[in-house]
Amino acid sequence: MLALIDYSLPSTRERFWLIDAHSGRVQRSELVTHGQGSGDVRATRFSNVPGSHRSSLGLFVTGEKYTGRYGPSLRLHGLEPGSNDAAYDRAIVMHAAGYATEKHAARFGRLGRSLGCPALAPDVAPEVLDALADGAALFVYGDDPDWLARQSYGPCSTAEFRPESRGD
């Protein structure tokens, strides 16, 4: 399994996808929170700094599940130096939160915000955390010009994936 978060979307929209890497099929899509310091409805500011209460961008690998303050939680290990490699030390984890629900979004016009963690609704978090525990990839995207400028992923187009363009 792998997961994607697109923080360029507002928190009132599904912006978390759980994907079966073998089939390429989306298993589920959900609402997901961002950090208090990252913005209001949309996440626009990101950080790797402890105490910033901002979400981090880039590629993570999941660690072990444990029971924390919000119940079942999943440790995250950032793989990008300077962008998210402090996630484990910052205690940036995936967890359940009552403020990550459609009901909360309808009442307040946005999801609640975490201290930088991607939090999911309590009724979906256990299944998602089980699916991602112990070594799954999580990629977190955001429209941050500084982060984007540092990335080596490079632009791509669908033409790059057509067999005729590879000379096959």
Image: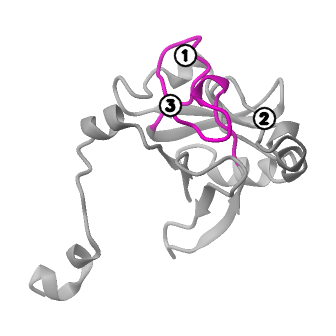
Circle 3: element type: loop
Label 3 environment density (alpha carbons within 10 Å; few <14, some 14–19, many ≥20): many
Residue at 57% from the left image edge and 24% from the top image edge: 54
Label 1 environment density (alpha carbons within 10 Å; few <14, some 14–19, many ≥20): few
x then y, percent, for residue 45:
50, 29
Residue at 25% from the left image edge and 63% from the top image edge: 156
> Relative to residue 104, is residue 35 drawn left or right?
left
Q: Is residue 13 above or below residue 46?
A: below
- Distance between the alpha carbons at the discs numbered 3 and 1: 13 Å
Label 3 is placed on what type of residue? Ser
Task: Judge whether residue 141 is colored magenta.
Answer: no
Q: Earlier in the sequence, mark 3 or mark 1?
A: 3
Question: Depth check: 68 or 90 in front?
Answer: 90
Circle 2: element type: loop
Q: Which residue is mark 3?
A: 56
Q: In the rendered view of the protein, which quadrant contains the C terminus?
A: bottom left
Q: How many marks?
A: 3
Residues drawn in magenta: 32-57
Q: Is residue 82 above or below residue 93?
A: above
Q: Which residue is mark 2?
A: 112
Question: Depth check: 90 or 65 in front?
Answer: 90
